[in-house]
Image (cartoon, helix red, strand yellow):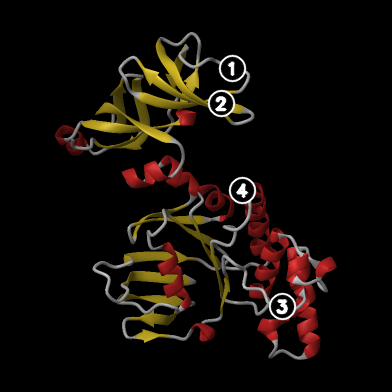
Amino acid sequence: MFLKVSQVDVRYAGQSRSAVEGVSLQLEAGQIGVLIGPSGCGKTSLLRAIAGLEDLNAGQIELSDRVVSRHGFTEAPEKRRMGMVFQDYALFPHLTVAENIAFGIQGLPKSDQTKRIQEVLGLVGLEEVKLRYPHELSGGQQQRVALARALAPKPDLLLLDEPFSNLDVDLRERLAVEIRSILKAANATALFVTHDQMEAFAIGDVIGVIQEGHLAQWADAYHLYHRPASRFVAEFIGHGVFIPGVRQSANGRLEVQTVLGLLSDEHEVNEVDLVHDARCDVLLRADDIVHDDHAAVKAEIIRKAFRGSEFLYTLRLQSGDIVLAHVPSHHDHHLGEWIGIRAEVDHVVTFNQKSN
């Protein structure tokens, strides 16, 4: 395992609780990991600890089978062979693009510097602007220069802290896809921090959801969306709501009775758990609900948001429960209109009902 974080705690002086508590995760060589969570959840503190910028109160961090942090020992950041890309890019305004990239490889012979600069310029697609200064570049170009500078020394691990936060939404999404391609082409191992789940989905092989300093789940995007490990992850990732249900099993399969009918799943269920806690809340994503004029279940449109190719409808059932649905945009129904819906749920996700 290339990066191994084991039961890490980070607590700042004067704080009553840890910013990071009991976090363990692993990243393989060539993988791109992403830390995501709400503001103040501890994701940047964890990144800084991995960079060697914060001491550990407990646990340890290993990089390529070498311990770089543990309680009482923190290897200096410059000895960790890590590259960092910050929110503000931190480019030197008085240096050209090529000179900015050369800053981290000044120990190489001049000919090797020139060769490496050309390599990373080609990697990020900036060969034609190498003699320009940062103020002459767009935000996206500046971000790629910062990435090129971080990649130039061939770091063992690249850390990126909200690198797209200063860019507009359209550019952020496009750049996330580009950066993933660049990192994969460089065979780089990287850990990325963001609060934007679309960025996380676009760039990450594996994604960690941080909740109040704890790692709530470490998985790929598919499992975070379809198999969330907790109610927090279910609510944080994707559009979704909860409706009440009653769990049961049929030949070892999970079935849940709801106002939308019987929902079933192929995954195994513990019979003992069902006996003691049959009542549950069922997670329904917008893509679990299908608009069908002939369906027996009807719902009132109480909100609609146009998304180009589709509407996101917020629907109220006769029971008062709320569900969401993605509906093709040529189905332009009016607020207050009742439409037929049915559930098509491949992954039935349930949690114990919240106590009032």
Real-space CA distance between mark 2 and mark 3, rounded to the nearest whole angstrom: 46 Å
In the rendered view, tell whether residue 167 sits above or below residue 118.
above
Q: Which residue is mark 2?
A: 311
Q: Position of residue 76 (x, y in %)?
A: 47, 86
Quadrant in the rendering for residue 75: bottom left
Q: Which of the marked residues, 2 or 4, is nearer the chain's N terminus?
A: 4
Q: Which of the marked residues, 3 or 4, is nearer the chain's N terminus?
A: 3
In the rendered view, tell whether residue 245 sits above or below residue 210.
above
Element class at badge 2: strand
Q: Which residue is mark 3?
A: 100
Q: Residue shown at 60%/58% (left/top)? A: 166
Quadrant in the rendering for residue 336: top left
Q: Which of the marked residues, 1 or 3, is nearer the chain's N terminus?
A: 3
Q: Amino acid at mark 2?
A: Phe
Q: Which residue is mark 1?
A: 331
Element class at badge 3: helix
